[in-house]
Amino acid sequence: MQLPEDQMRAGHIPADIYRQIPPGTDVRRVVIVQQAPRSYTGPIILTLVIAAGSVAVLLVIAYVVQVIAAAAVAVISASGGISYTVNRRHK
């Protein structure tokens, strides 16, 4: 459909829009423009980026806590306040 009269012949003017057309308007020259359908690509990508960022932040926090704990054990054992031994049995 390229011409307005093709629209009219096909009946593509909804009744609510038809009522809004001022009296005396040539309906054959009315072109109805519809809004494009919504794209969900942006919200889906945003959700995936937020989820990946949250996982990355949690992994960084876990790594930092592990490094701090290892450093604290090393400092305390070096000062003689705690000892940590690994016993391995030989056959």
Image: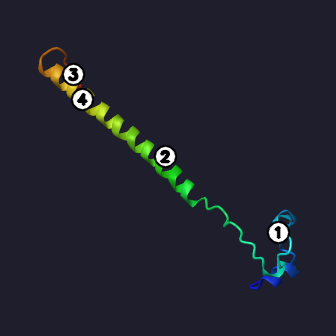
Q: Amino acid type of disc 3?
A: Tyr
> Whole-percent x and y of residue 67?
26, 33
Determine if residue 70 is in view. Answer: yes
The residue beneath circle 1 is 22
Q: Residue at x 75, y 72 (%)?
A: 32
**Around disc 2, counting alpha carbons within 10 Å, would you say few (fewer than 14), some (14 to 19), or many (20 or more)?**
few
Q: CA distance from mark 4 to mark 3?
A: 12 Å
Q: Amino acid type of disc 1?
A: Pro
Does the CB distance between marks 4 and 3 fall below 8 Å?
Answer: no
The residue beneath circle 3 is 84
Q: Of label 1 and label 2, which has the lower sequence position?
A: 1
Q: Of label 2 and label 3, which has the lower sequence position?
A: 2
Relative horizontal placement of residue 5, taking residue 43 as reference (left or right): right
Which numbered disc, 1 or 4, marks the residue closer to the eye? Answer: 1
Q: Of label 1 and label 4, which has the lower sequence position?
A: 1
Q: What number is the disc on residue 70?
A: 4
**Around disc 1, counting alpha carbons within 10 Å, would you say few (fewer than 14), some (14 to 19), or many (20 or more)?**
few
Q: Residue at x 86, y 65 (%)?
A: 19
> Whole-percent x and y of residue 45?
52, 56
Is disc 1 placed on a helix, strand or loop? loop
Q: Amino acid type of disc 4?
A: Ala
Q: Residue at x 24, y 29 (%)?
A: 70
Q: What number is the disc on residue 51?
A: 2
Q: Of label 4 and label 3, which has the lower sequence position?
A: 4
Q: Amino acid type of disc 2?
A: Ala
Classify 70 as above or below 59.
above
Which numbered disc, 4 or 3, marks the residue closer to the eye? Answer: 4
Is disc 4 placed on a helix, strand or loop? helix
Q: Quadrant of the C terminus?
A: top left
Q: Answer with the quarter of the image where residue 28 lies.
A: bottom right
Classify 80 as above or below 12.
above
